Image: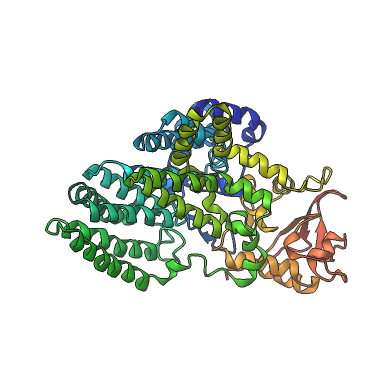
């Protein structure tokens, strides 16, 4: 299934993939991070030295997600050349994870007595999750999905030391990659703790493996994946703060594992779970309060102008009806199926699946980034729903398949979404801006925030702004520059060492209504009024307008 769909996706997108025009800005940034590493940047140096004011930006990412694409590029470069090797890597890497996801989701379904074949088909149709596995999607989201599903598989499996160790290992790996899946990791820990409370023998073995893998894995991770941004005062990635909180939280399963050797009664284990677990979690929160608000340090202006418009950060309830149906239709149908399946079977595995579903749907209600996992955790219950519909005749079976298919909900969502107005041939994209800037001598570019990764990946320029919450200084400088009257904008441009200014004719929609007096730089340039300190170097009438300062700008080290 992964091979067939991968071939179809690659043929559909072959032109863009061949030019390394990847689907998302984060995919482009991941590719650039890998290039920098293979080009000599240290394994521990995650800084993007061409993003933001000098000396660059400490990224909150991890090398773990770089390993497979980098290995493919390194292995194939001598045979195919750097460009072709990169194309193969960005195509093959997500498809390997897609295959892994289908294998794990089928294994979960079989552990619940359901058809692995049906689960594979549902997983392959699970919109929006499958959008993260298409060729070119080399960012970390697909890897995190596979790790969370591996945790779920271990939680519903047999109570063995090995299953517990797998659960602990994938939890550590997911924390190394990023913090987005922490609620699902917590759901896995809760499931293991509850099974330990109720099942003395099997639960104890699983808990011992889980606690040991957590403590040893976190200790090893602090040595292997300690990055140049380890001491950044944030809990938005695998930093010292997150590691400290995770180690303290890991004392909860360690306490249960030790106490379980002598405490056999359910009442005694309940007391250990509540007291030991509560103290460990409280210590984690007290020692690392930043982990309660991983993105709490975003500048209020940037939160309003930029972060509030990031798709994955939107609440499901804030989306238009069509987009909400597409994003969460499969998950919500699956939640109903999960409640029915857990209630009718009354098995621990079914209740654990439901717990993961409820957690993922709750995350989706707050931020749509939870929708892919909400769809995939629904697959086992949806497979059970289809099995229950089969004896009821073809109409019931077809209805069940349609209700369970994420692609069907995506199609319905498209029908419910008003058609966007067509803007003929404006060609105003980050790729168009990069094409105009690529031939110019390297310099600092001030451009809209989403242009940053494309410019970094396809030109030699430094970029002031990019869609990353840690680039507070650079992003704020970019917005201040474009939102200032032209004399003040010139001073800001020279202060930050800007050499080029680039924007689209219809750029900065997030700024709202245009100024009537055309005093602000963005409005002035969009109206065709170029201040004397800028010189347009793009052709007249070009949708992507590029300007250079009339005198060289001086770099700042602020």
Relative horizontal placement of residue 461, taking residue 337 as reference (left or right): right
Whether residue 283 is visible:
yes
> Relative to 391, does residue 198 appear above or below in the rendering?
below
Q: How many marks?
A: 0
Residue 145 at x, y = what percent? 46, 45
Residue 506 at x, y = what percent? 80, 55
Residue 493 at x, y = what percent? 71, 67
Whether residue 212 is visible:
no
Quadrant holding the C terminus: bottom right
Relative horizontal placement of residue 214, taking residue 517 as reference (left or right): left
Residue 334 at x, y = what percent? 50, 44
Q: Residue at x 72, y 42 (%)?
A: 415
- Nearest the eye: 435 or 149: 149
> Relative to 55, does residue 71 appear above or below in the rendering?
above
Q: Residue furthest left?
A: 262
Quarter of the image for residue 233 reads bottom left
> Relative to 84, does residue 423 appear above or below in the rendering?
below
Relative horizontal placement of residue 501, taking residue 442 as reference (left or right): right
Relative horizontal placement of residue 67, taking residue 371 as reference (left or right): left
């Amino acid at each position: 299934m992964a091979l067939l769909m991968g071939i179809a996706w690659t043929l559909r997108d072959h032109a863009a993939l061949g030019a390394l025009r990847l689907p998302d800005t984060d995919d482009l940034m991941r590719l650039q991070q890998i290039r920098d590493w293979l080009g000599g940047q240290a394994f521990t140096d995650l800084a993007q030295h061409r993003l933001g004011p000098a000396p660059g930006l400490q990224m909150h990412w991890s090398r773990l997600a770089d390993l497979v694409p980098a290995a493919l590029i390194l292995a194939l470069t001598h045979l195919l050349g750097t460009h072709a090797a990169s194309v193969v890597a960005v195509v093959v890497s997500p498809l390997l994870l897609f295959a892994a996801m289908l294998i794990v989701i089928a294994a979960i379904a079989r552990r619940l007595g359901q058809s692995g074949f049906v689960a594979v088909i549902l997983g392959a149709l699970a919109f929006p999750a499958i959008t993260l596995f298409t060729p070119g999607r080399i960012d970390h989201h697909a890897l995190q999905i596979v790790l969370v599903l591996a945790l779920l598989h271990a939680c519903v499996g047999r109570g063995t030391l090995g299953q517990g160790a797998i659960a602990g290992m994938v939890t550590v790996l997911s924390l190394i990659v990023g913090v987005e899946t922490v609620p699902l990791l917590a759901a896995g820990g809760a499931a293991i703790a509850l099974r330990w409370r109720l099942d003395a023998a099997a639960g104890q073995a699983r808990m011992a493996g889980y606690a040991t893998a957590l403590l040893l894995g976190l200790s090893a991770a602090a040595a292997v994946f300690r990055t140049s941004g380890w001491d950044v005062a944030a809990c938005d990635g695998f930093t010292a703060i997150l590691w400290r909180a995770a180690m303290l939280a890991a004392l909860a399963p360690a306490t249960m594992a030790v106490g379980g050797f002598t405490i056999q009664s359910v009442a005694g284990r309940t007391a250990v779970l509540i007291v030991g677990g509560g103290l460990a979690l409280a210590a984690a929160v007290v020692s690392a309060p930043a982990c309660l608000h991983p993105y709490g340090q975003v500048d209020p202006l940037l939160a309003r102008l930029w972060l509030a418009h990031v798709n994955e950060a939107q609440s499901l309830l804030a989306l238009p009806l069509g987009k909400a149906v597409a994003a969460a239709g499969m998950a919500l149908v699956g939640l109903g199926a999960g409640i029915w399946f857990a209630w009718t079977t009354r098995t621990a595995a079914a209740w654990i699946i439901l717990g993961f579903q409820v957690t993922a749907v709750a995350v989706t209600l707050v931020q749509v980034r939870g929708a892919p996992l909400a769809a995939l955790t629904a697959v086992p219950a949806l497979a059970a729903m289809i099995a229950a519909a089969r004896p009821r005749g073809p109409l019931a079976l077809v209805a069940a398949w349609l209700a369970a298919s994420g692609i069907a909900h995506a199609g319905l969502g498209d029908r419910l979404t008003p058609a966007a107005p067509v803007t003929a041939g404006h060609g105003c994209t980050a790729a168009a801006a990069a094409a105009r800037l690529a031939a110019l001598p390297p310099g600092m570019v001030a451009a809209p925030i989403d242009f940053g990764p494309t410019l970094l990946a396809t030109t030699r320029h430094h970029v002031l702004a990019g869609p990353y919450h840690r680039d507070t200084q650079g992003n704020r400088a970019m917005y201040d520059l474009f939102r200032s009257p032209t004399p003040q904008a010139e001073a800001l441009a020279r202060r930050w060492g800007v050499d080029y200014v680039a924007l689209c004719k219809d750029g900065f929609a997030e700024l709202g209504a245009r100024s009537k007096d055309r005093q602000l730089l963005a409005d002035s340039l969009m109206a065709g009024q170029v201040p004397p300190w800028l010189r347009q170097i793009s052709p007249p009438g070009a949708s992507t307008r590029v300007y250079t300062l009339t005198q060289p700008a001086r770099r700042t080290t602020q």
